Every structure is written in C-alpha cells, then in structure tokens.
Image (cartoon, rainbow, N blue to C red):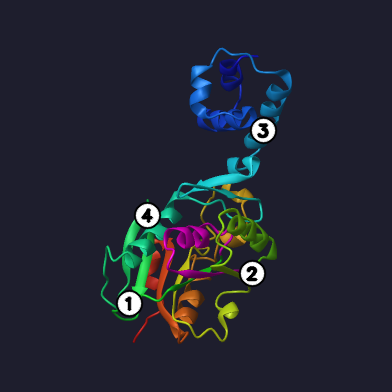
Amino acid sequence: MRVNQLLSSAGIEAADAQVLLASVLGVDRSWLLAHATDNVARDRALAFEETCLRRAGGEPVAYILGERSFYGRSFSVTPDVLVPRPATEGLVEAVMRLYKKIVQYEPLRWHTEEVDSGIVAAVLLRERGTLPPLLVDIGTGSGCIAVTLACELPETDVIATDVSSAALDVARGNVERFGVGARVNLRRGSLLQPLAGERRPFILVSNPPYVPEKVDLPADVRREPASAIVAGADGMDVLHPLIREAWNHPSCYGIAVECRAEQVARFPVVSA
C-alpha cells in the first residue's frame, strides 16, 4: 500500500496519522509529502495500522511513540507521567525571564502570564534582589521542567521531586539523556516534604494538578495519570497546600506555578 493510501485510511486525525507513520518509517513528516505515492513494506504497514488502532482507542500519541518534544528537546514519556504540553513551556519561559532579568516583578504580589487559553504562569517573589541559584520542581513527572531549566540556566541547580517512584524513574532517564545529572537532584516525596532541612534559598516551580473534578476531559487526557491532572472540586486541592507550605518554608524566595487563571484569586494570602 502507498503512503497516501495508508494515511487516508488511518481512521484518526490526519496530523496524528502523519506523526505515527513517520515514526514507523523512521522519516520526518516532510518525507511523507515528498513520497506520497511510494509503496510501504507490508510489515511497516501493519505496524502503522497497529499504532492507529491504539490512537483510535484514545491512547495519547506521546505514549505510543514513547516520547514528546518539549522546548526543543525530545523527552521520554510513559503512562506513568503527564504528557508535556506547550503551556508548561510558558511556565518555564516565565522563570527564565526572571533569571535572565528580562522582567522584574514587584514583591509580595502575584504576577500572571497567559500560557494557554485560560491557563497562566503565576509568579510570586518574596523580595527584590539576586535570585537564588537553586530551583525546586515539585511534581516533576517526566522531568521536562527540571531538565529544561538546568539546560537553559547553566548557573542553577535543580531539586526535582515526585511522589511517584515510577515517575522519578522516567525523570532519571531524561536527566541522564541530557547530561545534567550533576545538577539535577531527584527526590521522592509529597509537596515540600523532600525539602525538610533544606537551607539553601530556592525558587519553587511547579505544574501541579489543577483541573476541577467536574471538567469533562478528552479521551486521551483521561489515559494520563489522574493524580497529575485533577485536584478536587475546584482544582485547588494541591495548589493551596503547595503554596502555603512553600511560602512558610524559610528558604523559599519565590513561587512559579501553572494554573487556571481564575484560581489565582483563591490562592492563600501571603505576607512578608
């Protein structure tokens, strides 16, 4: 069967079909367009059909491929971790702008930047001054935030935590893939528990679960770890204690989190 025939009969969205066929054939998507009438070997065609069935069943493309691009790097992903999304790239960029002194924020006030429709990166600093060279990524999952910040901000170190040992295994693989093992320290635990006794000043960065229970999620999103997405009736079950614990930690210099825009007004009250 020809390339164009396989794509037209895939039974899934065209963009997904192109990504999956390109992966099966070991080519890029532009090759598919240039070789639309080429014949595809039977074993490759069967492999493509199998991936299409998985996609039609609601499995995320990233899980089928075993990887997802994030900030220009290909990260290993499994069903044990949330699939990295463009909105979270916006959270990473918000932190990078702080460290590169592109923006300066008034202390003790939440500042928000829209990173997707209705989704923001919310940033809070305790005081003005030099930012600490330590970042803490709570709920690291695949490690995409921690690894990206380590790669893009070589003057910083990162502590990356997760309650899931399976997720930390995935993160560890990505840390090793990008050669930042000397600067990214992985720790297991919930919220700020892994930071007990940490005296170095740090900025906390997190993409926590923040989706309210009532939200009807797409089929493929429902295949991702619910604990990394949904957080109670109003989506605040993790955000609220996370922010409270962070701000009460004597070494926390600031906080940057991804959340729904309307949730910022319900954040815990902070003071100097």
Query: Mark 1 belongs to which amino acid?
Result: Thr
Front in this rendered view, residue 58 or 36: 36
Q: CA distance from mark 3 to mark 2?
A: 31 Å
In the rendered image, is residue 52 in sight? yes
Q: Is residue 155 magenta?
A: yes
Considering only order in the chain, which callout, 2 or 4, is on the residue closer to the N terminus?
A: 4
Q: Is residue 235 left or right of residue 226?
A: left
Considering only order in the chain, which callout, 4 or 3, is on the residue closer to the N terminus?
A: 3
Report helix, strand or loop for mark 4: strand
Report helix, strand or loop for mark 1: loop
Q: Nearer the viewer, mark 4 or mark 1?
A: 1
Query: Mark 4 belongs to which amino acid?
Result: Val
Q: Which residues are magenta?
A: 140-163
Q: Mark 2 = which residue?
A: 163
Q: Mark 3 = which residue?
A: 51
Query: Mark 3 belongs to which amino acid?
Result: Thr
Considering only order in the chain, which callout, 1 or 4, is on the residue closer to the N terminus?
A: 4
Q: CA distance from mark 3 to mark 1?
A: 49 Å
Q: Give the numbered dot on residue 115.
A: 4
Q: Mark 1 = which residue?
A: 130
